[in-house]
Amino acid sequence: MNLEATGIESNFTALDWAIVVVYLSASVLIGFYANRFVRNMADYVVAGRALRSNLAIATMVGSELGLVTVMYSAQKGFTGGFAAFHIGLVAGIVTLLVGLTGFIVVPLRRMGVMTIPEFYERRFGRSARVLGGAILALAGILNMGLFLKAGSIFVTGLTGMNSDVELKIVMTVLLGLVLLYTILGGMISVVITDYVQFVVLAFGMLAACLFAVQQLGWDHIVSTVQSLKGNEGFDPFKAEGFGADYVVWMVFLGLISCAVWQTAVMRACAAESTKVVKRLYIWSSIGFMIRFLIPNFLGVCALVYMAGHSGLREVFIGDDVASEVSMAAMPVFLSQLLPVGFIGLIGAAMLAAFMSTHDSYLLCWSSVLTQDVIAPSTGDRLSGRGRIVLTRMLVALIGVFLLVWSLWYPLGQDLWDYMTITGSVYFTGAFALLLFGIYWKRASRVGAHLALVSGFAAVLGLAPVRDALRLDVSAEVVGLSVVSLCIVLMVVGSLLFPDRPQGGRQVLATEEPA
Amino acid sequence: MNAWAHFWTWFLVLGLAVFFGLAIVVTIGGLYDIRALFHRLGARDGERDGSSSSSE
């Protein structure tokens, strides 16, 4: 994508670059300072289980309102118009319901587990932990496979870099920064930097919305979407690319994002008590809604802005616009909208959030591979030092994979849809295991293994796979079908092959400890 | 504007207003929580240092 012919120039200046450098340096120093307090694995992974409500909410929203989230949500607003707002609405409602009921997350916190595979082992045995851990790591790594590309498109779009070479250089530099940051990582430093990011991004994004409305005018925004997309730009049940099955898929995704996705569950497990877990989810429901709503709205504003600019309209609007191009619309729009200084602050906070998210995910998947897959497979003969070395090697290997994947994978669908499908390889099976493992005493090991393996069918929802197999079915239909398959196999497998009775009584996580 | 446009307008305004309120509360409350977190972790380390030195 080359914007030179359009004649636009970014508002990003040397002052903004200086702000980025100072902000990122300060984040790294905070990481150094906070890591002085890390003494054990619980400190490292769940901040010593010492998070109180306000800090827990800030870190949860701060980590969820990252650069990649902003990119894929803005792309949804750009391609779907106001109809995309339903994603935030259902995410907020579902998270609120989880907070009010404690569904899944309170039993997990009561059990004191740190990872989902740990739950698998306690409930379904060691082999479920190894298999579930491998699937979790595979899906998680694929899920973050395009983070680098999204981050680089944001940086180049915001700063006005145009060529593909610059995009690749930015991708490589970002990866280097992320790997450096990850070495310094750990949950205590992450919660502090997430708090700072929450403050900057919350107020910064709110201000960006006000700037956008002030510049474009509310009536103009609504009328332009109406003229470009008609009623489909507002009605999610009729919109092209959405529809009733997509809305149902988003309801399920809302539940998964807050109650089953490993990084959100880690926040619940880090809370001081089950009471804090419920409060955290009730208040975070606003954050889970807003993390879609604000970027969706900025995407809508980008659409309106591009439509009013003849050069940009040719590049960004049309039926054959590549996914990578529509993703760049929001940062290009921000580069024209935000004033000098402010754009640097937003860019710096976004980059810090990008590194923090990468840090959390890299550590999460590499430690899952070490702790839940490799170590149990070797009979737990790995020493503590050996596990640390192995985890670091895995971080580097995953980093190389991310670079290669970002460079060659043909996206072919909206980034959000890519992420839901790659994530569903893990969470379709995980949902069945958590739901029945926690709330159904007869859930058995055979049922659990069948549900985990059947989650692989979700790869059929990826655009290149559907194209190769000539499948004329949408990603959301594939996702919902695989969820149903996992649930059916879990129930049928458990009824046909129940666990052999053991000496002690099975204790579910829903029961209070004696 | 059609009904959906009205609905999304109010949803956006309400959502941003509620989030603004939450951001203020969490920003202020979070500072106190960070202080408490470091206090607790520091006190724990102090206890550990004390117990290890007394056992030597």
Image (cartoon, grey):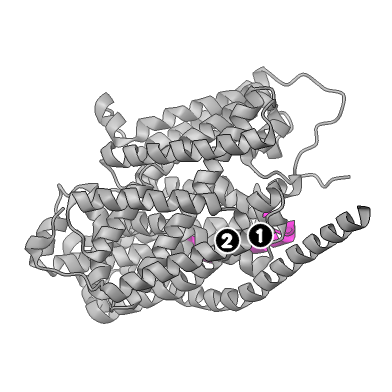
The residue type indicated by label 1 comes to Arg
Asked whether the residues under the numbered discs 1 and 2 touch, taking CB atoms below 8 Å apart as contact, a structural biologist would say yes
Q: Position of residue A75 (x, y in %)?
A: 30, 56
Most foreground residue, A402 or A483: A402
Q: Position of residue A309 (x, y in %)?
A: 12, 68
Identify whether A239 is placed above or below A129.
below
- Per the model, the C-alpha gap separating discs 1 and 2 is 7 Å
Q: Residues within 10 Å of mark 1 (few under 14, many from 20)?
A: few
Point 34% across, 41% down: residue? A403
Question: Seen in the image, is A10 located left or right of residue B3?
Answer: left
Tell me which secondary structure the magenta stretch mostly adopts.
helix
Q: Position of residue A83 (x, y in %)?
A: 32, 59
Most foreground residue, A73 or A335: A335
**Magenta residues, start to end:** A269-288
The numbered disc on residue A406 is: none
Q: Which residue is mark 2?
A: A32
Q: Which residue is mark 1?
A: A36
Question: Seen in the image, is A6 located left or right of residue A240?
Answer: left
Is residue A84 within the magenta segment? no
Callout 2: residue from which chain? A
Circle 1 sits in a helix, a strand or a loop, which is it? Answer: helix
The residue type indicated by label 2 comes to Phe
Q: Farthest residue in the front direction?
A: B56
Point 66% across, 67% down: residue? A53
